[in-house]
Image (tube, rainbow, N blue to C red):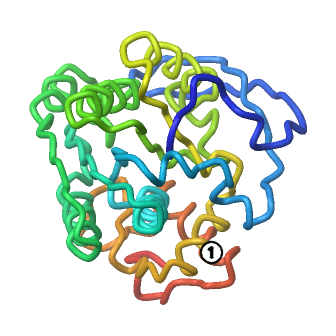
Amino acid sequence: RGFTAALSPLARVTSSVSTRLQDPGQRRHTISQRAFTARPLTCIVDSGNADIARSKAVVLLSGGVESTTLLYSMHQQATLGGGSVIALFSDYGQRGSAKEREASRFACQHLNIDLVELEGGQIGEAFRSRQKQRLHVPVPHRNLLILSLALSLAAQEGAKTIALALQAEDVGWYPSASLSFVDQFRSLASVLEPDISVHTPFIALSKSQVITRGHQLGLDYAQTYSCMKGSPNHCGACKQCKDRRKAFEDAGAPEPAAFYERP
């Protein structure tokens, strides 16, 4: 998950469509979404990452499928290349924060990686208190907030890379997951910290391809958490749970039926 000054063409653009999306602020946006053809799995870690593997990286970690896979992948590269990894977990008042934190701690303890936990729950509650409908994700454009904090942490820690686990199916789902946003943040980061790059190695991959990579790395996905509702067990009904279930099926590794509260 690293970002570079310019977005590299990791995926072949097959079409351009306009999609109307509901963002957390309950406003309608029309944004450009690019459809991608995912590359073969062998491209999941591109060969130009030698410099990243030799330096320190900040990995944005939520305890979910993609970010945990990215943490394992970056850890593997750092182990082989002599670099190091710091994980950053942000609580911004999301409903799943407690379970996400638990999953993040488990992964970092397993890999012996330092985890920095940022407490922004009061920010989320302040936003939520002014909303007519209590949202699962209370802060609009949360990636802007989280990436800004990551940039500050990377600057303090002397890290050269910020790694973000956006994958092809995320792109265009909400404005701060769009290619244009990522590209513009790269530009902003290069002004403030020219030596820090923003890395998105999964941007051309489907969720199921990310899962396949995680299995190759020995990741136990039962210890990850994806549910938007923050239930003790995955609800099976929210969008995140539905996407997760389908991705595991597409990867040929369906999860046990009892994993979800709702069949």
- For the point 77% across and 35% down, the residue is 9
Q: Amino acid at mark 1?
A: Thr
How many circles with numbers are drawn on the protein?
1
Q: Looking at the picture, how far across and down is residue 237, in whole percent?
A: 46, 63
Q: Quadrant of residue 83?
A: bottom left
Badge 1 element:
helix
Q: Quadrant of residue 181?
A: top right
Horizontally, residue 206 falls left or right of residue 9, namely left
Q: Is residue 246 above or below residue 152?
A: below
Q: Looking at the picture, how far across and down is residue 219, in whole percent?
A: 44, 78
Give the camera-side residue of 11 and 191. 191
Q: Is residue 237 above or below residue 89?
A: below
Give the camera-side residue of 115 and 56. 56
Q: Residue furthest top?
A: 191
- For the point 75% across and 42% down, the residue is 10
- For the point 59% across and 17% down, the residue is 29
Q: Which residue is mark 1?
A: 212
Q: Looking at the picture, how far across and down is residue 251, in whole percent?
A: 67, 76
Crowding at mark 1 (Cα within 10 Å: few <14, some 14-19, many 20+): some
Horizontally, residue 156 falls left or right of residue 145, namely left
Q: Residue furthest right?
A: 14
- For the point 20% across and 39% down, the residue is 93
Q: Looking at the picture, how far across and down is residue 116, in whole percent?
A: 17, 48
